[in-house]
Every structure is written in structure tokens, then in C-alpha cells.
Amino acid sequence: MSHPAPDLQRIVTEIADEMAQRTDRGDVASYIPELAGIDPNQFGLVVIDADGQVAAGGDADVPFSIQSISKVFTLTLALGMVGDRLWKHVGREPSGNPFNSIVQLERERGVPRNPFINAGAIAVTDVILSGHQPREAIGEILRFMQFLSGDSSIVIDETVAASEKRTGFRNTALANYMKSFGVVENPVDFTLGVYFHHCAIAMSCRQLAMATRYLAYSGRNPSTGLSVVSSERARRINALMLMCGHYDGSGEFAYRVGLPGKSGVGGGIIAVAPGKASIAVWAPGLDKHGNSHLGRIALEALTKRLGWSIF
Ligand code: DON
């Protein structure tokens, strides 16, 4: 078998160089004050192949706020805790609406469309919290990220969590609205506290690409042999990422990149090439849907050059 690693590193370096030259960088998220000051000129890309070879380019080791990317991992944890009972609290359909929209909740009796829009992720966090203190639930999520990436140095950026708590009026509205339907069961402040903290986990592209490996290899980390979830569950999480991972930009992402992926307003995106690679990219400037502008363009370039679209 020929080894793909040297080519992969060349392609990743080329893409990082191309992205560094671009002037169309999108706008950094400003509704979370702590994220508004991030330098938009940063760019990182990491691809880890089936043999565990790491190809890294640009600011691959700079930690950033993972924000909604955390929702993939809280979904994985919640499914591990309650299995298919989770689907009483949240649906599995694309919303076609912005990530912070409230409109569907009234018509659909407080059950959010999917686990990746804010309302859905808050409902998932509420399930993880049940029977625990907020501090324990936050610790559980953080330790899961450390375990998946094999890196115990990962921390939560408390300043970002506090910044979001101070200004999270919409999330507070969503949580209260779901509470009125009984979809959120714990005290709203507790659930939101855990949610803001897992969104504020800081990780680099290298750490995120490591943490995402189980989704690329049927639920197993191929290097350690450790199974995280069943292959069926990994397939289903990937299906949800493909359909809902970029909110009302999910169709465009599937059309252009052709991989399951999940974005965050910190400018990160994780993506999965099943059986081939796990990928993390970071460029803080966002498009109009709140997804990384250059991150998406870089992933499109990567999958085109490697023929990695799943379609
Ligand atoms: O709740 C929020 O608005 C943020 N903590 C997360 C939103 C987010 O990352 C949307 N993704 N593109």
C-alpha cells in the first residue's frame, strides 16, 4: 500500500498558504463580547489519516473557543447515558433556520429540531445534567474531551463562559421556553451554566482532529484500538452532522465539501472523511450563517484535491 502522508502534508501546507493570502476573511462573532477581539488573520488546519499520520498547517496548535463543535461531543455523551430515550427531548431533522432561532419551538411543543441548533444542544445538556451537580456535569464533559484527544491540558476558558452568560439573553429565552413545555427539566440557570461552559472549552485544531477520530473509524480510535461508540452510533452522529451541522448553511456545506461536519462561532469546523481522515480547521471570520468563511473554503479545496467527498 502506498503511503499517502507526504502528499497530505504538502496539500495541507499549500492550502494554509493560500488561506493566509486571502483578504475575504468574514466577520468574527461579536455577540459574545469575549470573541469579538479575536484576530481574524489566523488560520489552522490539521488532517489525521487512518495510520495516525498528522498533517498540520498554519496555526494548528493555537487554542480557540470550540463553541458549537462541543455539541457533537455532548450528543455522544448523552446518547451513552440514556440511549434512544434522548429522542424524546430533541429531534433529528434539519431546521432550515439560524442556530439561535426560537420560531419552531412554539409549533413543535418545545422539542427542538436537532441536537446542534442552540435549543437542541441546551436540551441535550439538560439530559447530561440530570442527577448531577452542574460542576460534575461540566467536569464530565471536559474529561471526555481530554480522553478523546489524549491531552489532559485542555481547559475551559472561564472568561468566555462568563462573557456568554452575561449576554446570553436568547439562550435564556430558549431554555425558559423549553422549560415551560417540560422539555428542560433542571433549573434553567444550571442547564445554561453547563451549556455555556462546554461551549467555552478551548482547543487547537490538532486536539480537535484527534478528538474527532472515532467518528471517522466506525466509533473506534484506530491508534489505541479503544472503542468510543458502536459503529451504528458513529454512523448516525455523522448523518446528523451532514444534515444539521451547519444550520441553515448545511446544504451549501454538503454541496461544496461533501463531508459530515460541525461548525462553531469561534470559527472552528470539524469534518469526517469516513475511513480516511478526521479534520479540524480554524479561521475566526464567519459567513452570514455563523460558520467559518475560510474554514469552509479550505475544506472544499481539501476534499476536491483528495477526492474525499462522500458522494
Ligand atoms: O450559544 C451560542 O450562541 C454559542 N455558545 C454557540 C453558537 C455556535 O457556535 C453556533 N455555531 N456556528
Image (spheres, rainbow, N blue to C red):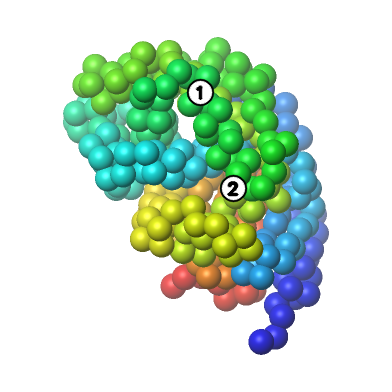
State the residue position of label 2: 148
Q: Is residue 247 at least partly visible in the picture?
A: no
Mark 1 belongs to which amino acid?
Answer: Glu
Local crowd size for mark 2, using a 10 Å CA cut-off: few (<14), some (14–19), many (≥20): many
6, 74: nearer the viewer: 74
Q: CA distance from mark 2 to mark 1?
A: 18 Å
| Sequence-first disc among 2 and 1 | 1
Residue 179 left/right relative to 200: left
* Residue 207 image position (x, y, % from top left): 68, 47
Helix, strand or loop at mark 2: helix
Number of numbered callouts drawn: 2
Left or right of residue 11, residue 78 in this image: left
Return the residue nearer the eye: 101 or 21. 101
Residue 64, position in %: x, y? Answer: 69, 37
Q: Is residue 80 above or below residue 276?
A: above
Q: Label 1 belongs to which residue?
A: 136
Vertical placement of residue 117 versus 278, above or below: above
Which quadrant of the rendered structure holds the C terminus? Answer: bottom left
- Tell me: residue 98, above or below residue 226: above
Name the residue rendered at 35%, 30% in the picture: 127
From the top left corner, tell me how far across and down residue 167 is, in percent.
53, 15
Residue 256's label in the rendered image is none
Whether residue 171 can be seen here? yes
What residue appears at the point 63 percent right and 41 percent down from the top-left corner? Answer: 146
